[in-house]
Amino acid sequence: MSSDSPEARPPVVTPVRVVIALCLFAPFVAMLWVGSYAKVDPAFIGIPFFYWYQMLWVLISTALTMTAYKLWQRDQRARRGGAK
Amino acid sequence: MNDGVNGVALGVFIFFFLAVTVMGFLAARWRKAENEHSLDEWGLGGRSFGTWVTWFLLGGDLYTAYTFVAVPAAIYAAGAAGFFAVPYTILVYPLIFTFLPRLWSVSHKHGYVTTSDFVRGRFGSKGLSLAVAVTGILATMPYIALQLVGIQAVLDVMGVGGGEDTNWFVKDLPLLIAFGVLAAYTYSSGLRAPALIAFVKDTLIYIVIAVAIIYIPIKLGGFDEIFAKAGEAYSQTNPATGAPRGALVPGEPGQWTYATLALGSALALFMYPHSITATLSSKSREVIRRNTTILPLYSLMLGLLALLGFMAIAAGVKVTNGQLAIPQLFENMFPAWFAGVAFAAIGIGALVPAAIMSIAAANLFTRNIYKDFIKPDATPEQETKVSKLVSLLVKVGALVFVLTMDKTVAINFQLLGGIWILQTFPALVGGLFTRWFHRWALLAGWAVGMVYGTIAAYGVASPTQKHFGGSSKEIPGIGEIGYIGLTAFVLNVVVTVVLTFVLKAFKAPEGVDETKPEDYTADAGDPGVQVELPPATAGAAH
């Protein structure tokens, strides 16, 4: 990599990387904005919204992290391929 | 509570305990390396663990017996506020996805065993590295003590904890035996023992949770019934405070506390030495990223587990010590043999993290105090020997702590530990991404965070305690109630940034950085990164 000329280097910020960053950042917005989910209704099988919503976010954030991981892998592979 | 010994439950408990003890000793032969006398071997399992072993190890490490007992206990005591553990563990994974792979790479390239090793290498400052090491050890000790509190809760409910009037030796004998065994196999097998036992622990835990979350609600008439009863219980006025006991949903003032606790704890979790030890034992960068996508399974489990706190209320469990609520719920609800399985799950759940924590603390002492300050020319064999001994000492220390002091002391210190460990974040994570911070500024920021956090926590009173009554307090300048650790962390960062500008303006000497930018992205297979079992990296790297 170090022998590459500066022009050959892909830019640091790319659309794919922005998507990755958003995937990783979304859970912070959702979870730290407590006011958006601090309520009892609608309940799910008797569990207040407050609880099932946060547990649902475990699944959502997992899906987001997985997406970020896949995109990152592809990004890295493309870069390594490009460098050689 | 201690109405006789529950024989069947105790029998099942002892069976599982013996099984993991045998596993612990046999673990020394698992994936055995040629060079078994290096610290990489004993303290990091040869840095050879793949995705699944790492998953079990990290899960076994982060979700401790204390977690299983304390999270539902918090819900049992006050309702919604205790549920912050769930958003906290949600936020952990995107965070570690970003910084841990870099730490893995640079540590493998330079043979770092601890976070302090990295900080010293990056900033060329033994003082800063010492600060990180001491913070790590201080924060880990009470954490180990709390694992013992977890075992004690289970023993109490099984009726072998002894009453108030029994002789202290008889009373504490079961705990002493459990700890003696733990210490012996950690000494002989190192990190391999908890890694192997973690399989048993997590399998048991998952089975118990799956059964509990289906079986108990059926017996109690469904979640509607459970939450209705819990809601009723929370609205009762607590005579000590004159306020309601808790709430099903956090009210407006509690939301800041909830969010800051979740964020602060998430930032702190991977500063703990034991989390880093488990991470560095993995064999490649990919293993870590892949793990951030499967570890949330534990968060889901934690959420379900938290619901047990409501069930304990609905089932009419009445305990003065909240820590006993869940074990007591199991005892009341389950047939004796399955209660035994559940208790074994909690008991073993204490052994795994206690082993990893003592190893992590021992590694810190050996690498960053013994080798840096006492005996710089220590050989890898000597390092391993010191580490093994210190792991014993750390455990004995924790034991003495639990046996001689009130339980609340351990909990207070654990609370302080969380605040303290968060203060190492700027040096560690900052250092992973930039060299801009000045080493002296980082040290000053750390000191300010530590002092503020300690004083603020000291000043928190609760109905039962004059000091260290909780971990949240008014945030200066904002006026909302927030997690002290996070406030201290913000102060820490501000001091660090300001002083860095000042020190740079005065051209204060920077330390030597022994790392290179490409070290942070190196992966297994790249030149200079040994995939497995480097011959005594521990000594050769410096």
Image (cartoon, coloured by chain):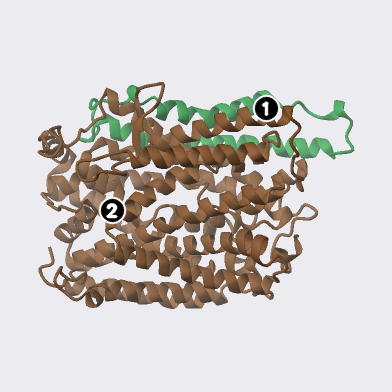
- Quadrant where the image shows the C terminus of chain B: bottom right
**Residue B269 x, y percent position in the rendering:** 47, 46
Q: Chain A rendered in what hue?
A: green
Q: In the image, A10: left or right of B199?
A: right
Against B520, is B19 above or below?
A: below
Amino acid type at mark 2: Thr
Chain for numbered disc 2: B
Q: Chain B rendered in what hue?
A: brown
Q: Is residue B90 visible?
A: no
Which residue sits furthest front?
B506
Q: First in sequence, mark 1 or 2: give its number.
A: 2
**Residue B377 x, y percent position in the rendering:** 73, 68
Using the image as rendered, state which of residue B313 and residue A68 is in the foreground: B313
Chain for numbered disc 1: B
Question: Which circle, 1 or 2, is nearer the viewer?
Answer: 1
- Quadrant where the image shows the N terminus of chain B: bottom left
Amino acid type at mark 1: Phe
Residue B438 appears in which quarter of the rendering?
A: top right
Mark 1 surroundings: few (<14), some (14-19) or many (≥20) residues within 10 A:
some
Against B211, is B42 above or below?
A: below
Label ID, residue B501: 1
Q: Which residue is mark 2?
A: B408
Q: In the image, B113: left or right of B389?
A: right
Gap in Å between the C-alphas at discs 1 and 2? 42 Å
Question: Residue, x 30% and y 34% (percent of image)?
Answer: A52
Dot 1: element: helix
Label 1–label 2 contact, CB within 8 A: no
